[in-house]
Amino acid sequence: GDEEGKGELAGQVLEHGLESVKNILRVYGPDGTGKEGISYWRYTTAYLSYYFAALESAVGTDYGRFNVPGMQNTGYFHLAFTGPVGPFAFNDSPNRYTNSPEVFWLALKTGDMNLAMGRLFQMKNYSEAIPKARDFIWYDSDWCAVGDLLVLDRHFRGAIEAVSFKSSYEDPEALYLAMKTGRNDAPHSHIDSGVFEFQALGEQWVSSPKSH
């Protein structure tokens, strides 16, 4: 720390934080899944983005903590389970769009320009994707000028298994199928293993029970 006599205390706080954060990073493995659904994925990832951004700003490194299985791909969890009509709201996620500026941060952190493009698509296509101050901080216009190279089909493993299939990220009438299986005792689960949704032509044809 900069204050006289506080360096040892600051070091202890930093050390304990670096050890504790390992516990939450494990839940993203092996593919970047959010076992509690999109909204809780965003809740967790938001605080992780603040933590890592603060570390890099203050000490210039994250001490390698980010480099664990799943973190490179976790931004795609949000993109994959947001369909053209609305989200695949399994477990405790509400049936409304989850706004996540953290996707821009993940794009910068991982060096993945396609993640940035995915966030930009959402801001263009969803009225609820209102730009936040963090979008302006983490936005890079050069990255968002590339073409659409986003993978349309995604599979996430872990405490739950979830897959999504899209015909397009930009077309509001795209075909979209998503389903979830895996453990029913995952946090915030609703004994809903096996649920699925189908969206097409701007309509929701098959819907999951949501968080009722």
Image: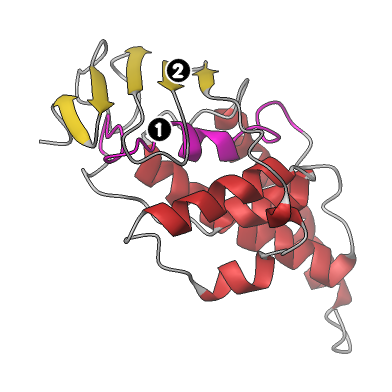
What's the residue at 25%, 37% (across, down)?
92
For this orientation, the residue located farthest to the bottom is: 4
Magenta residue span: 68-92
Q: Amino acid at mark 2?
A: Ala
Q: Considering the image in quadrants, where does the C terminus appear?
A: top left
Question: Residue under circle 1?
Answer: 81
- Residue at position x 61%, y 36% in the image: 23
Where the N terminus falls, by quadrant? bottom right
Q: Nearer the viewer, residue 8 or 65?
A: 65
The reply to whether the magenta stretch includes residue 77 is: yes
Q: Secondary structure at mark 2?
A: loop
- In the depicted structure, whether residue 32 falls above or below residue 6: above
Task: Work out whether residue 59 or residue 164 is closer to the camera in this orientation and state it.
Answer: 164
Q: Residue at x 20, y 18 (%)?
A: 191
Circle 1 — which element? loop
What is the x, y in percent for residue 104?
63, 56
On screen, residue 184 versus residue 36, left or right, reads left
